[in-house]
């Protein structure tokens, strides 16, 4: 029986540079795992490979029993929209769409659009007062919350977050982390979160430390 | 190559392609629904139809036989069409199921029924070609049916694997729609295309296809398509239906399909119990909808085809099209060409345009006959001194129109020589027929062919 | 619930209205390309209509003309004694200033230069006639349907030609050059155009078997005249038309190429600008096709807008050119509208497809690498 998410001996090279040097790592269903490490240590690369945004140079990745490396580009996209929710460091939103419409874009690629459902999802992250605003009219924290709503709209099996609080002040950071915490405890989401901030990592149940393309430490968090 | 052999070969190709296509789709269909054994009965059906082909050797090849075959083709089309409609409205989207003991019989019967009229009709048609040219039928039979097997063979080579996705697009009802559609497309040929109600629609389609090709060639300034010229006439149908019949045909053929499309495409999709996440519900709905769309493709294609052919036959803009009759072949006797003034289904004095084709030392000369408003009959060659003689004239309201240059010629001036008018012929009109000397035709035909400048104009 | 298609349209509208500048530039390129092609096609069609068919329906098979005009009496003598000639008739062509003198509303404003044909109008020649044929020497005129429409004339009214009044007794329509002309009896026309005893052309019908001899005979008898069989005229027209069409075709191709190049650079800039968007769409699960459809639809929308605008502009251009070059207006057929739109869509989609396919090949992780 393999774990829910499992990567084995993953090597990733960019030309001459090597971002990952044979990483093996597994996450069980319902776990909240933080990945920490210095800038350039390969955290984002690992997360992208887990989420299928990138493919490893060698090694294999599986999620829920599906071998991601065997999927072609479009089947990969289909797998992604049904199983993975992604939150980036910079809140990547389509600039000319409102909050609701940004969430609906994810619905559109998944199956059909449903505006009411999109509104509810925004309400869940406390954004019901900003439904018709464009990203440029929102603060950083608000943008990030729209991103979380969008990541969750298709009921993914796992939420991947790459420095979700990287550009936020302490207050907004706590707000976002509180949101993730609620999703984790109430809805039992599996979360993998990249950060370089010890405070943020402290919210997770497990902390994995990376250094120079390798996992050097893997332990439960203090809390 | 002798154009008659070419024509026979084209008929052979057409039948061969049809056979191969139906075979391929049916095979894939039976495979997809886990009943590959039924294919055997398909082969039996084809064998029965081929047996009828041998029988057709002993049939007389007169008008009556041709009419019978034509009517049969029409009935068979209608049977398949009605079966499709019945299945669609009874069990939309369902496939092969039910009394399994009857299925083999049904497959055998349907296959034999489907192919018999085509095979017999093609055989009659080829024999007629042979008689027209005064040559032995055997040559043409072998020419045509060699091609049947050639094409079938190629398709067999190409189609080792069954078609993918058959299940997604075809249920039993959709299979029948496909078969009816293919018959609709495929039986526009002279001699066995005259299905009373449907023929207008179907010949219109053929004309549409031809005209589209022809117009684009003209548009691209490519010289007229010399290869197609002889066979085109076989495809340009015989207009006779009033707008009403055409509309009726449209209603009968497209109506059920449109109804089916409406129901499947706009119908509710009930969500099963126990789907609580919105994403799950959306996905279920999207998949169901995509399935329904795919299953509607055949019905949509059928309706579209019917509509296009109806439109191109002139139903959509009655009177705006050119009347382009198909020339009736006639054979001179003792140097005289004789055309009956009236006969079953035609009357030269009814004001419509009539054409006759006669063989003049290997060349086909088309004659044009029409009653003028003053009551006299104009008899001319279907060509003028200026334009290439390939197409001749069509009729539109009170004009005949040169198909090449689209110059309208008032019908009352027919019989006058010169210019863009068709070259008049001296004819003797008796109580029952129109007589023209072959000498006269040969003399006037020289006006058409004498100048090499026609090549320049092309 | 908003349907998928409605949502798609909303998205499209948002993305187009948000970048008005870029969209306008792209639309403009398409407009220019389509306009030039439409006017070229319209002009060559119009010229074909003007040149063709003039004489074909009269039943003549030889035409005798002279640049300076023929002397009517001389020609009449020569032709009536010529063996092999069945019939002949004379015509005089010119152009006159015409106005509808009768209508008090606009006696001055509706004055235009129109073509005049002087001829023997003793039979209707298959015309579709409203009213009756003019009588000889009665100062009566027959008017083509296009002129009637353009000058807003009425049956029974008066028509002023170069200051002289003619009464309007009939309108004709046959889809030929007569539709755009005024027809008078030959003597009236000769007086009006101040060319007494002169004709522009003689239309001759001869035995088709011996055309060449008749042509030779007429040439000898009337030394100043140009004598051609109708077939030669038709062929010369075809050759001339062929050349014009070739020229128009070449111009169209060059313009299309130039427009495509400028368009594709605009489009690549647009796509590059939106690379992040493409990466994002991929990250949230868009397939290459699903994303491509958005951008191709945008290209289509731009193509449709440019196509419609280009058609209108092309029609105006064709009218202006024909007015300047031939002194009369060419009607651009409406069929060119769908053709123009199709052309616009094709070039704008092709232009956007090239950069788009490249962008769609990129990995989302590379595009979105947030530094
Ligand atoms: N697309 C790329 N091309 C080249 N080098 C890359 C690319 N992505 C990442 N790298 C390199 O791989 C290493 C790991 O990067 P990354 O996973 O982004 O680190 P982290 O997220 O831990 O800061 C870095 O040295 C980085 O320069
Ligand atoms: Mg990083």
Image: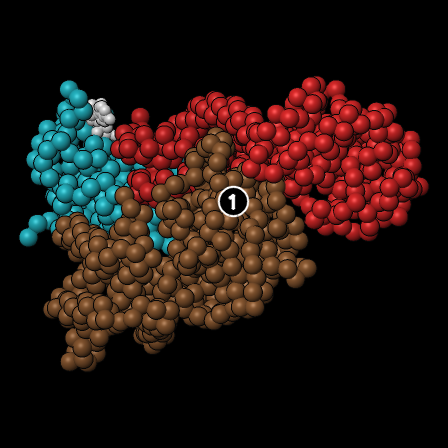
Chain colours: A cyan, B brown, C red
x, y (%) of residue C12?
47, 42
Marker count (numbered): 1
x, y (%) of residue B228?
37, 45
| Residue C307 versus residue B273 in the image, above or below | above
Tell me the quarter of the image containing the N terminus of chain B: top left
| Residue C232 versus residue C301 in the image, above or below | above
Between C215 and C316, the residue placed more toward the observer is C215
| Rendering quarter of residue C371 | top left
For the view shown, which residue lies furthest in the left direction?
A1
Label 1: chain letter? B
| Residue C186 versus residue B432 in the image, above or below | above
Between B189 and C43, the residue placed more toward the observer is B189
x, y (%) of residue B359?
40, 51
| Rendering quarter of residue B186 | bottom left
Between A129 and B395, the residue placed more toward the observer is B395
Judge whether residue A131 can be spotted in this image.
no
Judge whether residue C130 can be spotted in this image.
yes
Circle 1: element type: helix
The residue beneath circle 1 is B444
Identity of the residue drawn at 69% across and 46% down: C174
């Amino acid at each position: 029986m393999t774990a829910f998410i499992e990567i084995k001996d993953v090597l990733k090279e960019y030309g001459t540079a090597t971002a990952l040097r044979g990483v093996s790592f597994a996450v069980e269903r319902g776990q909240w795992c933080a990945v920490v490490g210095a800038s350039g240590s390969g955290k984002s690369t690992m997360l992208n490979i887990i989420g299928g945004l990138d493919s490893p140079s060698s090694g294999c990745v599986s999620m829920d029993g599906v071998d991601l490396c065997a999927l072609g580009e479009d089947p990969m996209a289909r797998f992604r929209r049904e199983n993975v929710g992604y939150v980036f460091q910079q809140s990547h939103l389509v600039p000319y769409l409102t909050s609701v419409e940004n969430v609906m874009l994810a619905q559109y690629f998944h199956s059909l659009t449903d505006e009411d459902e999109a509104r509810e999802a925004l309400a869940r992250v406390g954004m019901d007062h900003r439904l018709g605003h464009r990203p440029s009219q929102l603060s950083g924290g608000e943008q990030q919350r729209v991103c979380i709503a969008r990541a969750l709209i298709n009921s993914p099996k796992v939420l991947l977050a790459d420095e979700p609080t990287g550009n936020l002040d302490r207050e907004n950071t706590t707000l976002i982390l509180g949101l993730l915490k609620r999703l984790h405890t109430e809805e039992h989401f599996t979360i993998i979160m990249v950060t370089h901030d010890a405070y943020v990592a402290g919210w997770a149940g497990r902390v994995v430390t990376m250094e120079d393309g390798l996992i050097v430490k893997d332990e439960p968090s203090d809390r | 190559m002798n154009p008659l052999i070419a024509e026979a070969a084209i008929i052979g190709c057409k039948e061969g392609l049809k056979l191969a296509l139906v075979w391929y789709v049916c095979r894939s269909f039976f495979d997809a629904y886990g009943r590959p054994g039924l294919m055997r009965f398909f082969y039996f059906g084809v064998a029965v139809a081929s047996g009828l082909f041998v029988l057709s050797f002993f049939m007389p090849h007169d008008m009556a036989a041709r009419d019978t075959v034509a009517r049969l083709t029409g009935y068979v089309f209608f049977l398949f069409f009605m079966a499709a409609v019945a299945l669609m409205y009874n069990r939309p989207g369902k496939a092969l199921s039910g009394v399994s003991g009857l299925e083999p019989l049904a497959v055998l019967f349907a296959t034999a029924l489907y192919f018999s009229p085509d095979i017999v009709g093609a055989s009659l048609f080829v024999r007629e070609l042979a008689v027209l040219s005064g040559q032995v039928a055997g040559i043409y039979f072998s020419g045509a049916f060699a091609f049947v097997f050639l094409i079938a063979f190629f398709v067999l080579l190409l189609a080792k694997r069954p078609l993918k996705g058959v299940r997604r697009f075809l249920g039993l009802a959709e299979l029948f729609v496909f078969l009816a559609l293919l018959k609709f497309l495929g039986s526009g040929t002279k001699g066995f295309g005259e299905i009373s109600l449907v023929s207008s629609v179907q010949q219109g389609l053929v004309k549409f296809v031809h005209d589209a090709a022809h117009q684009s060639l003209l548009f691209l300034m490519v010289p007229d398509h010399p290869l197609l010229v002889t066979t085109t006439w076989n495809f340009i149908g015989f207009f006779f239906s009033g707008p009403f019949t055409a509309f009726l045909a449209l209603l009968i053929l497209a109506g059920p399909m449109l109804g089916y499309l409406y129901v499947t495409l706009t119908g509710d999709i009930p969500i099963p119990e126990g789907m609580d996440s919105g994403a799950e519900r959306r996905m279920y709905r999207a998949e169901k909808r995509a399935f329904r769309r795919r299953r509607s493709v055949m019905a949509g294609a059928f309706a579209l085809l019917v509509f296009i052919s109806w439109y191109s036959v002139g139903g959509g803009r009655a009177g705006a099209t050119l009347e382009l009759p198909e020339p009736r072949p006639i054979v001179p006797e003792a140097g005289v060409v004789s055309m009956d003034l009236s006969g079953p289904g035609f009357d030269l004095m009814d004001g419509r345009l009539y054409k006759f084709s006669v063989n003049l030392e290997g060349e086909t000369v088309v004659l044009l006959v029409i009653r003028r408003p003053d009551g006299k009959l104009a008899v001319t060659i279907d060509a003028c001194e200026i334009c290439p003689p390939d197409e001749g004239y069509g009729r539109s309201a009170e004009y005949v129109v040169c198909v090449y240059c689209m110059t309208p010629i008032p019908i009352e001036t027919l019989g006058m020589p010169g210019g863009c008018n068709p070259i008049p012929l001296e004819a003797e009109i008796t109580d029952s027929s129109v007589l023209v000397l072959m000498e006269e035709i040969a003399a006037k035909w020289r006006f058409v062919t004498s100048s090499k400048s026609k090549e320049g104009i092309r | 619930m908003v349907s998928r298609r409605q949502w798609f349209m909303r998205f499209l509208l948002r993305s187009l209205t948000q970048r008005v500048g870029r969209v306008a530039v792209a639309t403009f390129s398409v407009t220019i390309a389509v306009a030039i092609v439409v006017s070229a096609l319209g002009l060559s069609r119009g010229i074909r209509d003007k040149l063709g068919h003039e004489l074909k329906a009269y039943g003549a098979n030889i035409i005798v003309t002279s640049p300076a005009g023929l002397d009517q009496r001389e020609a009449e003598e020569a032709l009536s004694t010529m063996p092999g000639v069945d019939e002949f008739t004379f015509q005089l062509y010119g152009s006159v200033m015409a106005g509808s003198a009768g209508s008090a509303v606009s006696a001055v404003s509706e004055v235009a230069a129109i073509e005049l044909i002087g001829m023997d109008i003793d039979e209707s020649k298959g015309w579709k006639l409203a009213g009756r044929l003019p009588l000889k020497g009665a100062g009566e005129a027959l008017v083509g349907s296009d002129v009637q429409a353009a000058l807003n004339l009425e049956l029974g009214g008066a028509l002023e030609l170069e200051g002289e009044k003619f009464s309007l007794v009939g309108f004709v329509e046959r889809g030929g050059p007569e539709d755009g002309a005024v027809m008078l009896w030959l003597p009236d026309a000769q007086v009006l155009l101040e060319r007494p005893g002169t004709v522009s052309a003689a239309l001759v019908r001869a035995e088709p078997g011996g055309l060449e001899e008749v042509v030779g005979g007429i040439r000898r008898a009337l030394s100043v005249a140009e004598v051609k069989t109708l077939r030669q005229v038709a062929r010369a027209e075809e050759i001339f038309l062929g050349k014009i069409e070739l020229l128009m075709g070449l111009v169209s191709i060059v313009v299309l190429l130039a427009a495509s190049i400028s368009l594709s650079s605009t489009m690549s800039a647009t796509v590059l600008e939106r690379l992040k968007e493409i990466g994002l769409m991929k990250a949230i699960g868009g397939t290459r096709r699903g994303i491509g459809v958005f951008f191709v639809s945008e290209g289509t929308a731009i193509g449709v807008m440019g196509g419609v605008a280009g058609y209108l502009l092309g029609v105006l251009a064709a009218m202006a050119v024909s007015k300047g070059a031939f002194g009369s207006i060419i009607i651009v057929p409406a069929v060119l509208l769908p053709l123009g739109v199709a052309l616009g869509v094709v070039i704008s989609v092709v232009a956007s497809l090239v950069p788009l396919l490249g962008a769609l090949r990129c990995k989302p992780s590379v595009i979105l690498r947030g530094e």
